[in-house]
Amino acid sequence: MAKLILIGVKEKELGEIVHYLIIYFPYNEEMCSYTDTWIGELYENKYPLVAKGMWSGIINLKTHKLLNWKPEYGDLYLQAKICDSGTYFLLDKNKKVICKLAGYIPNGLIPDSDDCRDYIRLRINSDSTIENWPENPDYSDFIEDAEFVERIDTNIEEEPILDTRVEFTYSRLMEKLLQLPKFLQLEIGKALVANATEGFEEDE
């Protein structure tokens, strides 16, 4: 786990100067889900805010709004079990990164606080408001035992879904492909079938 904080930032001042939170985590369909209108049907269309297997969101901590949410996504409930695989950045009002935490979920700030730091649960309204965001956030997870630095690297340490530099076995390749959202798996499957069909036609 990595914890970094800019030199000069004091714990008692953090709540006053922090304006935004950026969240990144791998969206694994076996461990993450969107449901429609909180407890309704499983939402199986393209997953909002997921790209290349990663979920990313930026939250205005003063208004509790998810800034990259779109009205057409509607009202959705996100539940994600991510354990220690997330990365979190705190930003000031000018969107300058002042803290970074890579590892367990800072549940003093991010809902839900009762699951041993394994889950993120967000009730997101169509107007981008996160309904269950805490009124009195606790930033201590970002500060305790953090390393003070002059600059914070914003790169995200993540395992690529497909790495062409690695020679894959069939099982390893399938494991990687199954990490992709289902709609991408379907598109890849269609492309593979089309490619195979063209090959047979040429052979004939």
Image: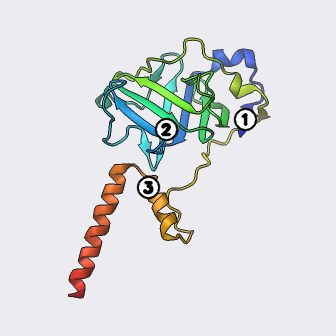
Query: In the image, is 93 to the left or to the right of 122?
Result: right
Foreground residue among 114 and 198: 114
Task: Report helix, strand or loop for mark 3.
Answer: loop
| Label 1: few (<14), some (14–19) or many (≥20) C-alpha neighbours in 10 Å | many
| Label 2: few (<14), some (14–19) or many (≥20) C-alpha neighbours in 10 Å | some
Q: Furthest-bottom residue in view?
A: 204
Label whose residue precedes the other's in the sequence (3 or 2): 2
Q: Look at 20% across and 87% down and name the residue there.
A: 204
Q: Which mark is residue 56?
A: 2
How far apart marks 2 and 1 lie (CA) works out to 20 Å
Q: Which mark is residue 4?
A: 1
Q: Which residue is mark 3?
A: 178
| Label 3: few (<14), some (14–19) or many (≥20) C-alpha neighbours in 10 Å | some
Query: In the image, is 175 to the left or to the right of 11?
Result: left
Label whose residue precedes the other's in the sequence (3 or 1): 1
Task: Report helix, strand or loop for mark 1.
Answer: strand
The amino acid type, in three-letter code, at marker 1 is Leu
The amino acid type, in three-letter code, at marker 3 is Leu
Q: In front: mark 3 or mark 2?
A: 3
